[in-house]
Amino acid sequence: FDVVCAMSVPEDVALHVVAHCQSQPGFQMRYSYGQEGSKMKDADLLHDLLLRKPDVFLERYGHLLNGALLEALNRWYADHYEVQHWLQHHRRARTAAHPKTDAVVRNRRYQKMQQLLQTTDYFSLHEMQRR
């Protein structure tokens, strides 16, 4: 699929987004192509990914972007459903005091269920019929 997304960002914005990602401490390319430690190659790959598959770029590297860059991308991809999903996902993660993953919520519920099983008769046949 060698066609640039019809709603792609301007070149200067794309270069700024890529440079910002690479400057972040948590940056690591998910897939290594070419020579080890080739920052220029990494920049080219990120740039290409942002222009061709912005939703995949945001899924992989959106957590590295600041609010201003997320808003800049929002302006250019306002009609792109998948991009909007990832922009919203990263905005929510940035604004939450303690972002909760599904696993954390599941674990909390499981711990509560175990507590109820051990300390009460909440799951007894009589109590369940009563409810």
Image: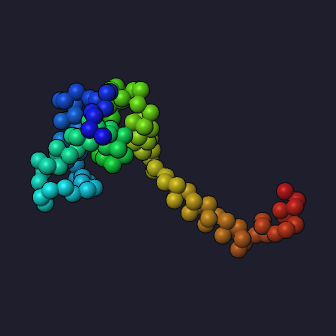
Residue 83, how many percent across, how many down? 39, 36
Residue 106, how many percent across, how many down? 57, 59
Q: Which is more toward the observer, 102 or 80?
A: 80
Query: In the picture, which quadrant includes the C terminus?
Result: bottom right
Identity of the residue furthest to the bottom in this view: 118
Residue 31, how many percent across, how many down? 25, 56
| Residue 58 showing in the rendered view | no
Q: Residue at x 31, y 27 (%)?
A: 6
Q: Which is more toward the observer, 61 or 105?
A: 61
Left or right: residue 60 versus residue 79 is left
Instruction: State the image quarter where residue 122 is shown.
Output: bottom right
Instruction: State the image quarter where residue 46 is shown.
Output: top left
Residue 20, how many percent across, how many down? 21, 41
Label count reads 0
Q: Residue at x 49, y 54 (%)?
A: 101
Identity of the residue furthest to the front in this view: 1
Left or right: residue 102 versus residue 17 is right
In the rendered view, how is the structure colored? rainbow
Query: In the picture, which quadrant includes the N terminus?
Result: top left
Q: Which is more toward the observer, 104 or 3?
A: 3
Please say if 79 is above or below 42: above
Q: Residue at x 27, y 33 (%)?
A: 4
| Residue 13 showing in the rendered view | yes
Instruction: State the image quarter where residue 10 is shown.
Output: top left
Please say if 49 is above or below 105: above
